[in-house]
Image (spheres, helix red, strand yellow):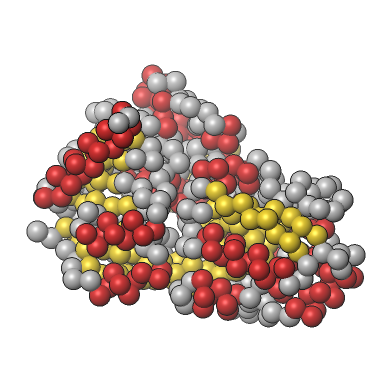
Amino acid sequence: MTIRTLTALTLGAALLASAASAQTLRYTTQGDALTLDPHSQNEGPTTAMNGLIYESLVTRNPALELEAELATAWEPVDGGWQFTLREGVTFHGGEEFNADDVVFSINRAKAESSDFSTLIDSVTEVEKVDDFTVILRTDGPNPILPNQLTSIFIMDEGWATENGVEIPQDYAANEETFAIRNANGTGPFIVEERLPEERTVLTRNAAWWGEGEFPGNVQRLEYRPITNAATRVAALLSGEVDFVLDPPLQDLNRIEQADGLTVSTTPQIRSIFFGFDQGAEDLRTASVEGNPFSDVRVRQAIDMAIDRSAIQRVVMDGLSAPGGMVASPGVLGYTEAMDAPTEVDIEMANSLMEEAGYGDGFSVRLDCPNNRYNNDEAICQAAVAMLARIGIEVQLEALPRAQHFPKIQNRETDFFLLGWGVPTLDSHYIFSFLMDSEGSWNATGYSDPQLDELVAAMAVETDLEARGELISQAWTIVDEALPYSVIHHQVLAWGLAENVELPIAADDTPRFRYAIVNE
């Protein structure tokens, strides 16, 4: 027996033993947080985990409404936004929270290795007015800065300096730092144990400023990633865990019909789509010279060949909303007309392939995650068969998201599946990361100076009507350029023990400060 096996068994026994603990909530998902460094990876499950430990100036409640967190008030001032900070807050290590930590953290989040820098690239200076007042100076008026700050977590400057983590982990370069397994936030839960991909235990922060202000009574969170979908469901059915964040859609009825279990569902603000590297001179994995994806007719042909209704019916068990925009309902800029799914037309798609000079087809690799989105690998498998009908032979490479995402961030993929949630509920977030020429998640090589100008303009336009027009113009450009082929918007499903009350949220983020475990 290996030490690792022995450790796993010991931890498993401990997990079962703790089942009887009062107000302990045990939960699982298919994939662990990628890092505990709060500024390294702008990725849903990672941000959700870090949001239990760290806090931002402004946050969102389960209804996704903005509310105060480490700032108690905020208002636009000449040259930026002023934030009044919450007094009497301490970090988990006992250090007092003040304006110096905000100055440090915002500047840290703007570092080159931060995956959040795009969110706050309008911030030119963080000015400390006094110990509990800061002004974030911006390069022009930024009407959505509070929305953009909901994912920018605040670290203790002294702790970061002491442990040599003044700069965020460079995740794409596989950098190892103290901050990826250790944390010192102000949030409602403290890291007791962190074994990546095995187990994370968080205990309630008795000194948390929010004690008594939220209904939650959870004293201990025990998280264990379970990659295998059947094993995740079995853990819920057997009572080994109390909450599964991502139960397989085909098992929802079984869960709901089981004694003591329930299911919550809601539309999610996350869109699933394929991306094409249209900017490379030659594709890395194609059977032909040059880049077929640089021809919009090939991208249109692929878009027409994908049967979204079949994916919804067969792959997603009806729990998806086929779409045409990388924006779901609820995001500013969304329109039903723009979101209409492309109709399947194989004859027209083959004609477009012929016109583009690829009547004989070609082969290419599709990179796909297998532990991030609902039925992600199955969606890709369905696309393989659909694209064969227009002569595109697809080699599918499905990998865990820890290996898949660096391919996108390092622009090492020709053709990929990605999902995108919008925590700001504003289209600027989508354009700036995915479509702007400098977007950090734009692995398509798509670049349009006119779009870039619109993205820059909507970031500083305070007239709501004028700003809406900028967003509309940008979506029209993207719709014609087709840098991505949208499949659908996800529908969330959570599986819970009936004695657990946890409000589901459209951003798929469990907010355990609201969770109640009934005895």
Residue reaching furthest to the front = 1
Which residue lies at the image location 68% right of the left edge and 62% below the top edge?
A: 484
Q: Quadrant of residue 230?
A: bottom left
Query: In the figure, is residue 281 to the left or right of 48?
Result: right
Residue 341 visible within the image? yes
Q: Quadrant of the C terminus?
A: bottom left
Residue 432 visible within the image? no
Q: Is residue 362 above or below residue 219?
A: below
Query: In the figure, is residue 210 to the left or right of 162?
Result: left
In depth, the one of 182 and 473 nearer the eye is 182
Q: Is residue 184 above or below residue 399?
A: above
Which residue lies at the image location 67% right of the left edge and 50% below the top edge?
A: 442
- Residue 235 % position (x, y): 27, 56
In depth, the one of 96 and 156 nearer the eye is 156
Which residue lies at the image location 83% right of the left edge and 47% below the top edge?
A: 282
- Residue 296 % position (x, y): 81, 64
